[in-house]
Amino acid sequence: MAHPINKTEYLEKIANTIEMSFEIPDAEKEIANDAKIRFEAVLKRLRDSTEHLDIIYEPFKRHESVSTKSLVRKRGLLNRYKQKVKENFNELKTIALLAIRKLDTFATGDTSIQEIINSFVDSVEDVEKLVTKFLDVMGDYESDAFREDIMSSIDAIRTQTGKLEVLVKDRIIEHIDTNILSNNWMSSKRDELKLEIEERAPLITELFEERQKALDPGSFPGSSKETQSLNVSDAQRAYYPDHARTMNIGEFGE
């Protein structure tokens, strides 16, 4: 005589199989989490570097007439500020490179990630070109158009860093969450799957009972309990430490 099969265990096996099909290998999850943290660091450095430009932008915005003589007197301060701007954006490039290396792990065979990486590299290079132009302008403090050129250069950098920030937040980090870590996609799919299983559970139970009765007609009495729903647990959410840092960026005197 065939041994009776427990109906609850049978349905739990289905749930476990479904759960396993959604699981992401721990190694890939760790790399994806690391990539996300690195891109969040890119955002932090990007904002800090852009805000640092306000130190020179705001004084020039308040004073329409800045004499060449006053700029020459402060050339030492201008040169130190110029060097700090250069260091800020060089560090941004370094952090960006480390982030790309992590994300590149998933680029093989995934054209969407390849496109995102290419867009990111192009955007960082666009920022770099504008910063190089700004540094050139900073070195020409005896120019009559120094104030206007400085403000124009900073406006251009702000525009491009704004585009880069949107790219990182709305495309890269969103892609990591949705298509690699599957924080949003997995949750929605599991909800859909849970509902589908609940709808099909009576049919599964009926087929199960018919099969069991065929093996041993007297071993499986009809159940008076309602069918158990298969509650698939939510995906474990990764913990991201706070990488915010304070920066001593000095001041630009008027």
Image (cartoon, rainbow, N blue to C red):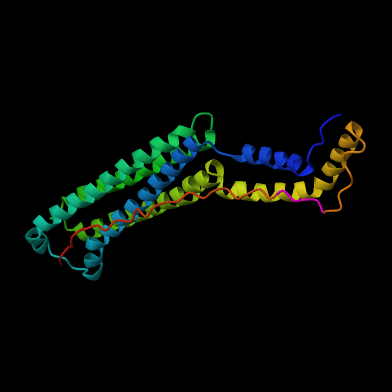
Q: Residue at x 14, y 53 (%)?
A: 80
Q: Is residue 60 above or below residue 88?
A: below
Residue at 16% across, 65% down:
66
Question: Can residue 177 be seen from the camera position used here?
Answer: yes
x and y percentages locating residue 35 in the rendered image = 42, 42
**Image point 35% across, 39% down: which residue?**
98
Q: Quadrant of residue 76?
A: bottom left
Please state the horizontal and vertical placement of residue 96, each as a whole percent of the image. Answer: 35, 42
- Judge by depth and name the residue closer to the eye, 52 or 226: 226
Give x and y (percent) for residue 91: 27, 45
- Please state if 136 lies on the left or on the right of 171 as rendered: left
Residue 11: name its quadrant: top right
Q: Quadrant of the C terminus?
A: bottom left
Q: Could you say which is closer to the camera, residue 228 or residue 196?
A: 228
In the rendered structure, the answer to whether residue 148 lies left or right of residue 210 reads left
Is residue 2 covered in magenta?
A: no
- Rendering coords of residue 164 (x, y %): 40, 49
Q: Quadrant of the N terminus?
A: top right
Q: Residue at x 86, y 49 (%)?
A: 223
The boundaries of the magenta stretch are 226-230
Visible in this render: residue 145? Answer: no
Task: Name which quarter of the figure residue 62 lies in.
Answer: bottom left
Q: Is residue 209 left or right of residue 112?
A: right
Q: Residue furthest bottom?
A: 62
- Report the number of numbered marks: 0
In the rendered structure, the answer to whether residue 137 lies left or right of residue 127 reads left
> Predominant secondary structure in magenta?
loop
